[in-house]
Amino acid sequence: MTVPPNSSTPGPGWYPDPAGSGRLQWWNGGAWTGQFSGPQSQPVSQAHGPRPVEPRKPLSDRAPLYNAYIWTIVVLPLVPVILLMFWNPVLRLRTVGTRQVPTVDPASIFTAPYFLMLASSFLVYGICAFLAYLDWDKLRKDGVIRPFHWAWVFLSQAVYVVGRSVIVHEVAPRRGLAPVWATIGVTVIVVVLVGLKMSDLVATMANQAAGI
């Protein structure tokens, strides 16, 4: 303890440790004794506190933004639609009730192309999840800090594409949104093809039912 000139020496007692340990040290009235009171304060470990969020840094103009993974994710929804084009169910009749009334058999739609189309939908779902992980991992290696998480693809393939593109566009202005526009184009194609196919199937089934 430093005593200013022309001032009296403090009496014996517990005073803050001049070494800055955060504890109280006993002052005997003339010198420090080395006797401490109370636990030593420990610096707060960052491991137990909130971790600072690393800001995203802009990418260089030459940094790669697209890869085969994201483009495959964009076009994969076309696969079940292509198989849908080959689905042409033929109506069959079956008798129902005691009067043996002929009715259309709903099992007529369950043809090989139908089950192939259904299986392809689940397969596309799984492949999109795997490719989304690869794309997410590659973005991290290419310098994108905290890219849009790949698990969002389980909600929807389009959700991942849009979220991924927004983050990439944030770190690479004027670039990164091409997959969004491609997804919009694929969605329009899918809606048009499905609409045309459903109209054709309804018309075909109506004609078959009329001829029965």
Image: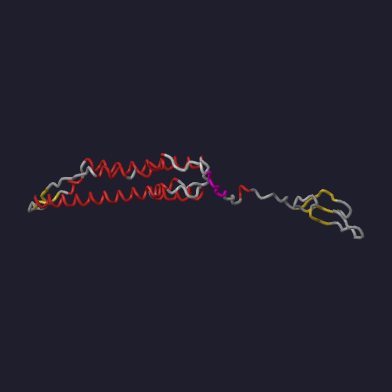
Q: Which residues are magenta?
A: 54-60
Q: Residue at x 92, y 60 (%)?
A: 6
Task: State whether residue 86 is above or below residue 202.
Answer: above
Residue lying furthest bottom:
7
**Toward the viewer: 33 or 153?**
153
Q: Main secondary structure of the magenta part?
A: loop
Q: Is residue 200 left or right of residue 125?
A: left
Which residue is more in the foreground, 176 or 48? 176
Give how far across and how far down residue 158 sits, in percent.
38, 49
Q: Give the percent coordinates (x, y) of residue 196.
A: 23, 50
Q: How is the image coloured?
A: secondary structure
Q: Give the camera-side residue of 92 and 31.
A: 92
On the image, which quarter does residue 117 sit in? top left
Count of marks, rendered view: 0
- Is 79 on the left or on the right of 101, as rendered? right
Task: Report x, y in % for residue 136.
Answer: 46, 43
Hey, which quadrant is residue 71 in on the image?
top left
Of all residues, the one furthest to the left in this rendering is 99
- In the figure, is residue 185 to the left or right of 150? left
Q: Is residue 9 magenta?
A: no
Q: Is residue 59 in the magenta section?
A: yes
Q: Position of residue 63 (x, y in %)?
A: 50, 41
Residue at image coords 27%, 43%: 82
